[in-house]
Image (cartoon, rainbow, N blue to C red):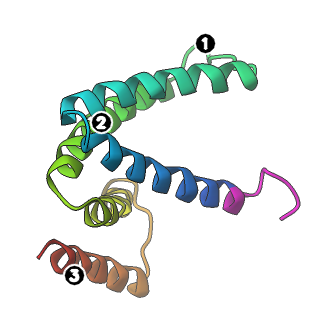
Amino acid sequence: MDNINHWLTYAILVMLFWGLWGSFSKLAAMTIRPMDVYVFQVVGLILGAAVIAILVRYQPPVRSIGIAYAILGGVLMTIGAYCFAQSIARGRGTVVVVVTALYPLVTLLFGYLFLHEMLTFKQFIGLGLALVAIVLLSG
């Protein structure tokens, strides 16, 4: 890995930070209501985004359909965070985090169905196994 621009470096950092996010979410849900967890995590998200924008000297695009997609993605992410807070307050943190971490299944299917991205036979098998994992973990 030559520098921080390598995709794997960022992917490992995502794994680390999101893994800690799941753990701290469970700790929060053990002491405050799920709606409180959700609201204060959104506050943290906004604060974190502001700090990162300042650090990287962010300049927003002037005009782009990508802005609409990004806002829609943010709305969907926020709804998902609300559902996550509700789930982690009611379930075992370790299981909730693992099941919700399978969200790339939705991304893969969306890419295949609507963006015409190709999936190999092995990837289809992986999707099936991931679905089996959800069934086994939730039982």
- Residue 11 x, y percent position in the rendering: 61, 58
- Residue 131 x, y percent position in the rendering: 23, 75
Bounds of the magenta span?
A: 1-9
In space, the residues marked 2 and 1 are separated at their CA atoms by 23 Å
Query: Would you name the residue on which mark 1 appears?
Result: 62
Mark 2 or 3, nearer chain start: 2
Mark 3: which amino acid?
Val
- Residue 27 x, y percent position in the rendering: 34, 46
Query: Would you name the residue on which mark 2 appears?
Result: 76
Judge left or right: residue 135 versus residue 38. Answer: left
Query: Would you name the residue on which mark 3 appears?
Result: 132
Mark 1: which amino acid?
Val
Question: 10 Å neighbourhood of mark 2: few (<14), some, or many (≥20)?
Answer: few
Looking at the image, do the residues carrying marks 3 and 1 touch, with CB atoms under 8 Å apart? no
- Residue 114 x, y percent position in the rendering: 33, 54
Q: Which residue is drawn at 41% across and 31% down?
A: 69
Q: Which residue is drawn at 14% across and 51% down?
A: 90
Res. 18 mark:
none
For label 1, the SS is loop
For label 2, the SS is helix
Query: Does the magenta-highlighted stretch encompass residue 2?
Result: yes
Image height check: is 53 above or below 86?
A: above
